Image (cartoon, rainbow, N blue to C red):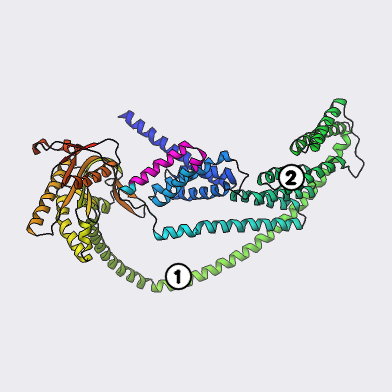
């Protein structure tokens, strides 16, 4: 007992620890996404979507849609700057969004995303991703064959054509980019090149999310020009080289030649640039001089061959080495100066700085005192005014409070009576839609009784033969009257044998024996209920109680997933699994064998032998199963 408690406590602590780690991962990813752009942002959106799939489908859909939109822009046909090896991220985004929609039961959206993922994965020869999409496409196909409507309605189709959300998002992004570009241009006119370059770089990051390769290449040229104007030739060289590579990808030969010309001019300026004042003569030893000359010669050779990337690399090595050597020489010169004179100058400067700081602190203290006194007067006046207003409203409310309380008490009594009536009405209506056991569990708020779980049940499918031609010649009122007559006594029989009708299908229904509660002999109950329904239909048709009616019933037993499925807005007690599909296929075989009741071998084996031996089992093939199954014709 003590070991069990220790194990349970450890399990709970481990669960809490894992939940805390997951929350920290989500928080970290959300913070990083705010400052990321392009492919890095897409990678983190996919990770965040995968995490939310485990506990919050709505947030998974929100992040998944952002990831798909971003992937569409990044890997668009017009964006040649992106690496094709990263296109698998687009397939991953489609698959994750498809799963989120599938778990939300938005099957039409799930279908479109899994189809897009399969198509993209096939083009890229990504077998694992294509297989993952195929698995869910098969599930959607099975749902549709089981009678689930996964097609778009009119409003969904209209929403897809208009694509309002994407239009608003793109418009907002365009406005943001244009605003940043205008701010950058304003700083450029004011010759504030540092702030202009910062804003142009922001625009480049935002455009990377749009996949706009041409505008990105043009802005890199703009940044290179501004660095050149500000005298930062190293960064200017780097951005001109970047613009050459990007314009070669998009095929803009004119801009490539222009950038190459700018690069050549920059190198010439750097070689001929001399300081306006006489420089300090610094001598290097022969080894240092030789290394500097080698770097400079390499840079000049690469300029001649128009390999500006290598030229920039060697020029930076030359500049960095020269600066390091100059700094080392100057440091040695400073060490040789008169340290006592320097120390005296430093002490005088520190004393003057302390005096200035003291005077500044005195002025600040005086200003703070004046500000506190002024703020105190304002706050005092506001408090006095607030007190007077509060006293007035308190007096006024006290006069009418008794009347309001009396009216509220009367309304409360009326509301209580309405709630009692509403509760009774809800019980009555809910009992008409689901079985008594499910209705009682839902009204009492007992979610454990209707929780999703795997159960062994017996499924019954019933179909009225010839219903379509019958309905074509009748008015809607006559059809409803006929359904009430036929289904009325069938419902009583199902309830009698502890069954639960999950859904009516117009000319038939599906019933479950063993969920949400098993009565120990579910196959027996389903078999006796089916036989009694067949008998009653034949008797009532013969004596004229109902119009001449012929039915077909199929029984099959096996494991299913049963429970209250859905979101907080709408839930439904659902039964899903291959057992349901097989039972429906067996019912349809009644047309082929001209029978009224067929049962599977699984149901037959579960029956009590006191019912006697039946005819020999027949082996048949049914749609959706590779191997044949055995059935028994009972009636």
Looking at the image, is mark 1 or mark 2 nearer the viewer? Answer: 2
Q: Secondary structure at mark 1?
A: helix
> Mark 2, residues whose alpha carbon is within 10 Å: few (<14), some, or many (≥20)?
many
Disc with the residue nearer the chain's start (1 vs 2):
2
The dot on residue 584 is none
Estimate the x, y position of residue 77 in percent, counting from the top left.
58, 48
Estimate the x, y position of residue 327 in percent, counting from the top left.
82, 34
For the record, the magenta segment spans 120-142
Quadrant occupied by the C terminus: top left
Q: In the displayed structure, does residue 500 sit left or right of residue 193?
A: left
Q: Secondary structure at mark 2?
A: helix
Question: Cβ–Cβ below 8 Å for labels 1 and 2?
Answer: no
Give the camera-side residue of 444 and 247: 247
Task: Tell whether position 300 is magenta.
Answer: no
- Residue furthest to the right in view is 278
Where does label 2 land, which residue?
A: 240
Estimate the x, y position of residue 518 in percent, counting from the top left.
20, 42
Quick check: can you spot residue 281?
A: yes
Give the camera-side residue of 104 and 261: 261
Where does label 1 land, which residue?
A: 394
Task: Tell whether position 127 is magenta.
Answer: yes
Q: Quadrant of residue 244?
A: top right
Number of numbered markers: 2
Give the camera-side residue of 373 and 393: 393
- Residue furthest to the left in view is 543
> Mark 1, residues whose alpha carbon is within 10 Å: few (<14), some, or many (≥20)?
few
Q: In the displayed structure, does residue 635 sit left or right of residue 81?
A: left
């Amino acid at each position: 007992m003590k070991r069990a408690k220790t194990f349970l406590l450890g399990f709970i602590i481990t669960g809490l620890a894992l939940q805390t780690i997951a929350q920290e991962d989500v928080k970290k990813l959300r913070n990083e996404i705010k400052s990321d752009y392009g492919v890095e942002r897409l990678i983190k959106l996919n990770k965040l979507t995968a995490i939310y799939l485990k506990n919050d489908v709505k947030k998974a859909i929100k992040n998944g849609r952002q990831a798909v939109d971003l992937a569409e822009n990044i890997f668009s046909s017009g964006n040649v700057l992106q690496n094709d090896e990263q296109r698998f991220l687009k397939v991953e985004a489609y698959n994750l969004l498809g799963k989120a929609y599938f778990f939300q039961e938005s099957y039409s959206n799930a279908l479109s995303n899994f189809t897009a993922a399969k198509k993209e994965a096939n083009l890229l020869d990504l077998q694992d991703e294509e297989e993952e999409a195929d698995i869910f496409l098969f599930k959607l196909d099975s749902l549709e064959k089981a009678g689930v409507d996964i097609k778009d309605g009119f409003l969904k189709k209209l929403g897809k054509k208009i694509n309002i959300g994407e239009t608003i998002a793109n418009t907002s992004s365009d406005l943001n980019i244009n605003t940043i570009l205008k701010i950058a241009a304003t700083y450029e006119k004011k010759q504030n090149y540092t702030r202009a370059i910062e804003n142009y770089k922001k625009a480049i990051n935002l455009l990377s999310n749009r996949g706009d390769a041409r505008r990105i290449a043009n802005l890199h040229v703009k940044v290179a020009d501004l660095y050149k104007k500000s005298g930062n030739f190293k960064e200017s060289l780097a951005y001109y080289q970047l613009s050459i590579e990007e314009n070669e990808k998009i095929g803009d030969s004119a801009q490539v030649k222009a950038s190459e010309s700018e690069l050549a001019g920059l190198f010439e300026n750097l070689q001929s640039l001399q300081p306006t004042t006489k420089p300090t003569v610094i001598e290097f030893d022969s080894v240092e001089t030789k290394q500097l000359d080698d770097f400079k010669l390499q840079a000049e050779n690469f300029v001649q061959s128009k390999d500006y990337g290598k030229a920039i690399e060697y020029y930076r090595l030359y500049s960095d080495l020269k600066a390091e050597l100059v700094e080392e020489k100057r440091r040695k010169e400073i060490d040789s100066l008169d340290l006592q004179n320097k120390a005296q100058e430093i002490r005088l400067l520190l004393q003057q700085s302390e005096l200035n700081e003291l005077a500044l602190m005195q002025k600040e203290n005086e200003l703070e005192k004046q500000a506190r006194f002024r703020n105190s007067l304002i706050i005092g006046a506001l408090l006095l005014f607030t007190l007077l207003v509060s006293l007035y409203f308190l007096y006024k409310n006290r006069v009418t409070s008794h009347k309001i309380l009396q009216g509220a008490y009367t309304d409360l009594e009326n509301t209580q009576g309405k709630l009692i009536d509403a509760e009774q009405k809800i019980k009555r209506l809910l009992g008409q839609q689901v079985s008594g056991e499910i209705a009682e569990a839902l009204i009492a708020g007992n979610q454990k009784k209707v929780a999703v779980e795997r159960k062994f049940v017996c499924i019954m499918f019933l179909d009225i033969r010839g219903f379509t031609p019958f309905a074509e010649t009748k008015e809607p009122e006559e059809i409803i009257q006929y359904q009430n007559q036929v289904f009325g006594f069938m419902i009583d029989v199902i309830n009698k044998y502890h069954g639960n009708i999950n859904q009516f299908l117009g000319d038939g229904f599906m019933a479950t024996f063993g969920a949400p509660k098993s009565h120990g002999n579910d196959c027996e109950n389903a078999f006796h209920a089916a036989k009694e329904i067949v008998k009653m239909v034949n008797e009532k048709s013969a004596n004229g109680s109902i119009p001449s009616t012929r039915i077909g019933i199929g029984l099959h037993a096996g494991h299913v997933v049963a429970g209250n499925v859905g979101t907080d807005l709408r839930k439904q007690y659902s039964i899903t699994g291959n057992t349901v599909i097989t039972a429906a296929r067996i019912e349809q075989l009644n047309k082929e064998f001209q029978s009224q009741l067929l049962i599977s071998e699984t149901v037959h084996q579960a029956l009590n032998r006191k019912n006697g031996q039946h005819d020999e089992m027949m082996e048949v093939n049914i749609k959706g199963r590779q191997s044949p199954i055995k059935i028994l014709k009972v009636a």
